[in-house]
Amino acid sequence: MKKIVFLLAMVGSAAQALTLDQYLEQARQKNSLFQAYEMAVQAADDKVDSAGLDLSPVLTASYLKGVDKSLPSQISNERNISQYSIGLAKKFITGTSIKLQGDLADYKNPGTAFPGFDQYSTGALGVSVSQSLWKDFFGYGTRTKLQREKSAAQIERTAAELQRRAYLIQMEADFWDYIVASEDVRLKKANLERAEKLQKWTANRVSNGISDKADLMNIKALTSLRSVQYQNSVEDLKTAETKIRENLGLSADQATPTIDGQMTQERNYIKSLASSKNVLSLEAEVARLEASTKKNVADEVTDQLRPDLSVFGTYATTSYNRDRSEAISKVTDSDYPKTSVGVQFSWVIETDAKSGARGASQKEALASQYKAERKVKDGVNAWNELLRKYQVAVSNVKTLEDVATFQRERSKAEQDKFLKGRTVTANVVTAETDAAEAEVNLLKAKSGLRKLEASSQLFFAENNK
């Protein structure tokens, strides 16, 4: 397999040439903008993992110290309180909330007239359970909220991945532009050198009276044109080199590395996608996730506006003793329990604000769904168009390879005929120009083919996402 190796100004000894994969890997590591996109993807992954934070266990602890001199004061005129509390609460996906609570309180009543009540301690250890029977019916609202949080995080994740891939594609395009610019310089330089040789040879023929002066002027014009083309190609190469250096994060004192570009090597990603079903664009996936999120938001709003009917119950053991340690040791005794059960109902009265909130969320969800359906269709069309262009580009490269070969052979034949005096200068000039243009066109076609392959990274197979 033929390799095209290009060398730009190097400082020091020659380094190993970078292949496309090595170049992209180095760009990933050193390009600050790409690293920012990478961090955005990782941050979005963390947000996906953080969905359902409301279902995480919550540990609470508190300490209270107070002095109560308020009336009425049946035991004493002053009550000093020290209260300790610790609890663990958890909400489940079913909408059930459970809380474990432990309390300890120390009371001091200086100046009390009741013996034994100057100080004492109380303790309580209990569990409380609540369950919604209408709003958030057995966790419906909780699950809807969880799905909404996951969908919203997935939107950020997919959008960040879209940016990351787009920038990676751009860096790969810069790689191929650099390859084209480097090879274009080589071709333009070779064309100029051939024109200069032809000009010198024609000048000798004119001075010997074998050729006309018009032939010499034609060759000089060609040489001047080739000189301009060569200078322009050098400038294009400098521009392409600047992008390569930016992508690799090179400092001013670092040399541009040698680039090893294999333009005949196909990328496997587009081939893998071409054999897959249900290929979607990342842009369409973002739209689908947005529609899913809007749908969840609408369901969540509807659920929040429902009447709330919930049942709850508590059970706690209690203890009482003058000595704190005794109060603590007996806190699990079931001799003096506290129990309660209840039901609670609440309802947001129907108003324009309530119906407006519900209607707005439902209409936004429907609009987002329509947009997503359109984006999916556009994505499918874009993928089919990409495949069509790719197949045409493959065919064009093969054709242009033949054209370049024919033009090279034609140019050589015209030069041989010219040296033997069997053709005119105009034919040689035309053949030279056509051969040079064929080489450049072939190079650009190969570069375009590689760019089309790279752009396929904006698509994915749904079953292999």
Image (cartoon, rainbow, N blue to C red):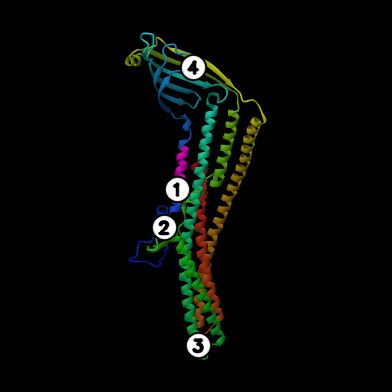
Which residue is under mark 2?
A: 249
Q: CA distance from mark 2 to mark 4?
A: 64 Å
> Can residue 186 be seen from the camera position used here?
yes
Mark 3 or mark 4, earlier in chain: 3
Q: CA distance from mark 2 to mark 1?
A: 16 Å
Q: Secondary structure at mark 1?
A: helix
Seen at 52% across and 50% down, the residue is 458
Q: Amino acid at mark 2?
A: Gly
Which residue is under mark 4?
A: 313
Mark 4 or mark 1, earlier in chain: 1
Q: Amino acid at mark 1?
A: Glu
> Can residue 271 be seen from the camera position used here?
no
Q: How many marks?
A: 4
Q: CA distance from mark 2 to mark 3?
A: 54 Å
Mark 2 or mark 3, earlier in chain: 3
Spot the residue most to the right: 352
Residue 322 place in picture, x, y as percent: 34, 12
Residue 348 place in picture, x, y as percent: 62, 25
Mark seen at residue 205: 3
- Residue range in magenta is 39-48
Mark 2 or mark 1, earlier in chain: 1
Mark 1 or mark 3, earlier in chain: 1
Quarter of the image for residue 42 reads top left
Mark 2 and mark 1 residues within 8 Å of each other at the beta carbon: no
